[in-house]
Image (cartoon, helix red, strand yellow):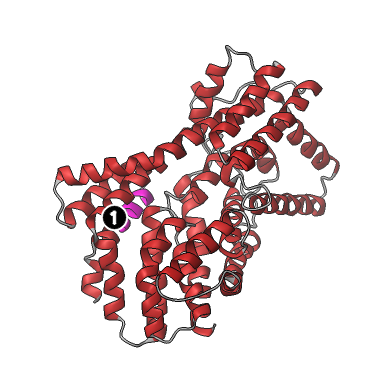
Amino acid sequence: MFIELIKNPVLISVVIMLILSALRLNVVFALVISATAGGFIAGMDGNAIMNAFNSGLTNGAKVAFSYAMLGAFSIAISRSGITELLAGMLFKKLNKETTPRNILFFKYMLLGILTLAAISSQNVIPVHIAFIPVLIPPLLSLFDRLQLDRRAVACILTFGLITPYMFMPFGFGQIYLNEILIKGICSSGLQVTADMAPKAMLIPALGMVAGLLIAVFVSYRKPRNYDNVKSEISETHAPAAEVQVKPLNVIAGVAAIAVALAGQIWLDSLVIAALAGVLVFVISGVVSMRDTQDVFTKGVYLMGGIGIVMIAANGFAGVLKATGTIDTLVKLLASGIGAQKGFAVFFMLFIGLVITMGIGSSFSTVPLIAAIYVPLCIKLGISPLATVAIVGVAGALGDAGSPVSESVLGPTAGLNADGKHDHIYDSTIPTFIHYNLPLLAAGWIAGMTL
């Protein structure tokens, strides 16, 4: 079993992608190379690989366009002065409380606010990563003033983007837990109910909380000075001059955010929501018709990188699915573990981690594994509650720590607005260590005890 496992094209291509990314090769290049390698190892010819890759690209086009529009909206918001007003208020408060004790309190208060904002983005105000390029860039100078390690912020944002949907049946959690996880398990032959999902995912969610606490209070609690960190932003894309804060512009900014939020919730369209927000700025005179070209161009620069990575990730996933070896990988597990429950639970979680790390989406992983995992759990005498936990965690594993996951790309987009935050070493690796390892352990405990 072990030899066949390490020869599997899916596993090999994911490992190649992670190694190339760790060596600082651009993620898009790493995705293309690893997809090609995986296809050839699976026996596909060059034309078949490229056809599968190109077919997958179309699945990411909608996301990329949405992110470009979101970037334009973020730039328009910065023109209103509302973000400068927010940062100025925080700086003013910080200047009045310069004792070490007060600065420490202010630091953790700010981290707490960011945690609540990230969690709320999944349920209370379901905008997913849309809040990050709006909220985070104007706070970077404040982070530097506090000598706050941005890796802690990356871990906080990723925690807030993942934990709510894997535990709370609201917003995106309603989709993941009820429409994907529970429905997938039921369709695979095991009757479970929606009220079982939060109970089954409680222990795994506590594993995520443990990872968050370790990241904030242990790993990245020490001050980090970014003054000596060389910015990757060229002079061409240097930050614009400080925006003058005007009351009417700020009011327009608040109105634009409210309109965009309403559009996102009621129309379920990030594109329309962002466009409506930009139009509010145009109508109010904050942004002129002529300046919309510049706003869009800078918006694409701000968020377009995420879109391109997501497009390439969909192409990569298209090749992995076309090889037919994802099913082989899962079936290999089912045929090789025998009746050893502990071993079986661990490898079910591990295979889920590998698949999600490759395709970058928990929501896409569950349908791929449920059909095999559910009968296997029934065969091993694993309870329905534990089965829900195993399949749910196997899907969620890898969302944190994958170079192509929105939950990691989103934080990078905000924290790297000044070019001082590395996607792999400051977002991907920290979130992988602090979430996948505790989640793997907590998922195993849930699978063995529930």
Q: Which residue lies furthest to the top in this view?
A: 290
Q: In this view, does 333 lie to the left or right of 380?
A: left
Q: What element carries label 1?
A: helix
Vertical order, 20 against 60 (above or below): below
The percent position of residue 293, horizontal first and vertical second, equals 53, 17
The percent position of residue 61, horizontal first and vertical second, equals 40, 37
The image quadrant where one finds the N terminus is bottom left
Q: Name the residue under label 1.
A: 321
Q: Which residue is drawn at 16% across and 52% down?
A: 44
Q: Residue at x 38, y 51 (%)?
A: 22
Find out whether residue 64 is within the magenta segment. Answer: no
Question: Observer-nearest residue: 270 or 109?
Answer: 270
Q: Is residue 196 visible?
A: yes
| Main secondary-structure element of the magenta-colored stretch | helix
The percent position of residue 254, horizontal first and vertical second, equals 74, 31
Question: Observer-nearest residue: 67 or 19?
Answer: 67
- Amino acid type indicated by mark 1: Lys
Q: How crowded is mark 1: few (under 14 residues within 10 Å), some or many (20 or more)?
A: some
Q: In this view, does 314 lie to the left or right of 433?
A: left
Question: Observer-nearest residue: 104 or 437?
Answer: 437
